[in-house]
Image: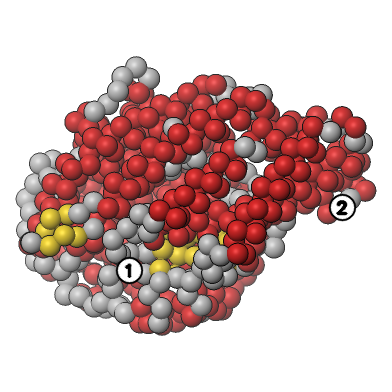
Amino acid sequence: MNKEWSLDALYKGYDEEFKQDFDALLKQSEEMKKFTDSLASKTEEDAVVSMIAMQEEFRVRMRRLGSFISLKKSTNTTDSETISWANKIDQAFSELIETFTKMDAYLVQVTSLNEIMEKHPDLKEYTFYFDELKKKAAHKLSPEEESIIGKMNLSGASAWAMQWQYLTSTLKVDYKGEKLTLAGIRNLAYDKDPAVRKEAYEAEIAAYDKIKDGAAFALNNIKAESATIAKLKNYDSPLDMALKNSRMTRKTLDAMFEAMREYLPKFHAYLRAKAELLGYENGLPWYELFAPVGESGKTYTTEEAKTYLVEHFKGFSQELADMITRAFDEAWIDFYPHDGKVGGAFCSNLPFIGQSRILTNFDGSFSDVVTLAHELGHAFHGQQIQDHRPLNTAYTMPVAETASTFNETVIMNAAISEAEGMEKLVLIESQLQDVTQIICDIYSRFLFEDSVFEKRKDSFMFSNTLCELMTDAQKAAYGDGLDPSQMNPYMWVCKSHYYRTDLNYYNYPYAFGGLFARGLYVRYLEEGEKFLPKYKELLRATTVSSVEEVAAMAGIDITDPSFWRSSLQSYAELIDIFIGLCKECK
């Protein structure tokens, strides 16, 4: 089986086809500029129809080129040719920001839009798209100002993000006479040997000292730029901007966090129980968060992971199982860590070719199999939206984690139901381990980012201050579940979400996705096979609906804390089972 993904479905390299498409993109950019300059001479009908057609063609070509470059860069951040093309594509897009702003402004003021859609029924698919443009109009600057911001970003936040990516992907961690990548050393947190876990943690912490100042400068400047843009665009705050871009209300966020805070003590109890099981008295040390519990030390090859996932998902959806088979067989997945490759895992949907690409740092643990299930959930989501029109293929942050976390729930619950004795304990703990990440750790990440934005209003934060903020956030979220002398003050260095220039607060969506998916899973258990068509349609609607509207399709009111409490209660019951099993093991 392949170890790396194939990008041949996009391009076979920076070859003649790639260069022809890039030249075509530049040519189309000039045509679109000329078009917007001549809008006054066109009828509204001709302008709207032509404008949408041009944007659709441009979007597909831009995503094809941009995806190829981005995916190449994620597996080799040191490749100079890729970095050069990344700069060129960013420059090409920045040159068009003013054009797109003019187009959006024109579409917002078209008085005969309803009549035009009646004459051109295919445009009715863009009803939600047009409505969103009107909502965003209140936060748009002039075309010239939007263009300036986009161009300055290239040498501003985007450049700082590129510095952070380079620092973390090329960092060498000294470990027992070897030089490991950051992703490689972090994978040792799952090792069955407690001495390895502790030594790897200490090596990781020591390594951050080499890049902490460079990362601090990157984070400060990225967040300062985000705050400036939010203010210029008349948002109340960067969080307000993030929520509106997520098509989610503050009432929903507050309802979710209210319920999460109520249940934090339950997760602290899980952490203390795990600590006691592993022989610790003062809560769980940070380096034991992912410690395997019990005797199950089974590892998986990629072939075994494929078989496991297909077998467990085909009972839920044959369509999903078939897609998983295709992902493995057709080289959609880049599996293993190596020098220059980014850490973590992600899925990139490529709806214009009906595929996705998945990056992992696979080391064979069951947790890595669950990670594959998670990312393949994103790919399944992409499969549901790929028949939308090109301007209708983007879903927002919160619902982005729905299918992925639903997949995790399906695979874990199926595995737990099949297990007995110690194996059951191991699997329950594995699920609680992951859930604690989306409750406690995500809450700590939110608190940290919120405090960074607040402090950045009037001060620059050096690495020691950022470490203090991170530690404070961890103490607030993890409570007495963790050993206060063994935290991880450098989590702000390794989490890529903080350095996204296009997204702020990319933390709460994980909690949303986990709890929303849990609620959907309860509906699946109640409705059986009748749920699947509803689930697929719900996923399809995520690109053309608000978050609240998507939830309503499943009969769920996410502005009510009681929904979130119901999801959290199911986890609380699992924690009680785990604590009971721990007592039996003593």
Question: Residue 256, percent across and down?
Answer: 44, 41
Q: Residues within 10 Å of mark 2 (few under 14, many from 20)?
A: few
Q: Is residue 489 left or right of residue 248?
A: left
Does residue 385 lie above or below 320 as drawn? above
The mark tally for this picture is 2
As measured in the structure, the alpha-carbon distance from the residue carrying label 2 to the one carrying label 1 is 47 Å
Q: Foreground residue, 233 or 507?
A: 233
Q: Secondary structure at mark 1?
A: loop
Q: Secondary structure at mark 2?
A: helix
Question: Residue 526, percent across and down?
Answer: 53, 66
Q: Is residue 140 visible?
A: yes
Q: Foreground residue, 436 or 14?
A: 14
Instruction: State the residue at coordinates (27%, 26%).
Output: 461
Q: Which mark is residue 554?
A: none
Q: Earlier in the sequence, mark 2 or mark 1?
A: 2
The C terminus: image quadrant? bottom left
Instruction: State the residue at coordinates (44%, 82%).
Output: 311
Question: Residue 229, percent across and down?
Answer: 51, 26
Question: What's the image's color scheme?
Answer: secondary structure
The N terminus: image quadrant? bottom left
Tell me the residue that label 2 is attached to: 121
> CB under 8 Å between callouts 2 and 1?
no
Instruction: State the residue at coordinates (74%, 37%).
Output: 33
Q: Residues within 10 Å of mark 1 (few under 14, many from 20)?
A: some
Instruction: State the residue at coordinates (23%, 58%).
Output: 181
Q: Given the current orientation, which residue lies at the most extreme top position?
A: 458
Rendering quarter of residue 111? top right
Rendering quarter of residue 157? top left
Question: Residue 436, percent across and down?
Answer: 30, 52
Q: Is residue 557 visible?
A: no
Tell me the residue that label 1 is attached to: 336
The residue under label 1 is which amino acid type? Tyr
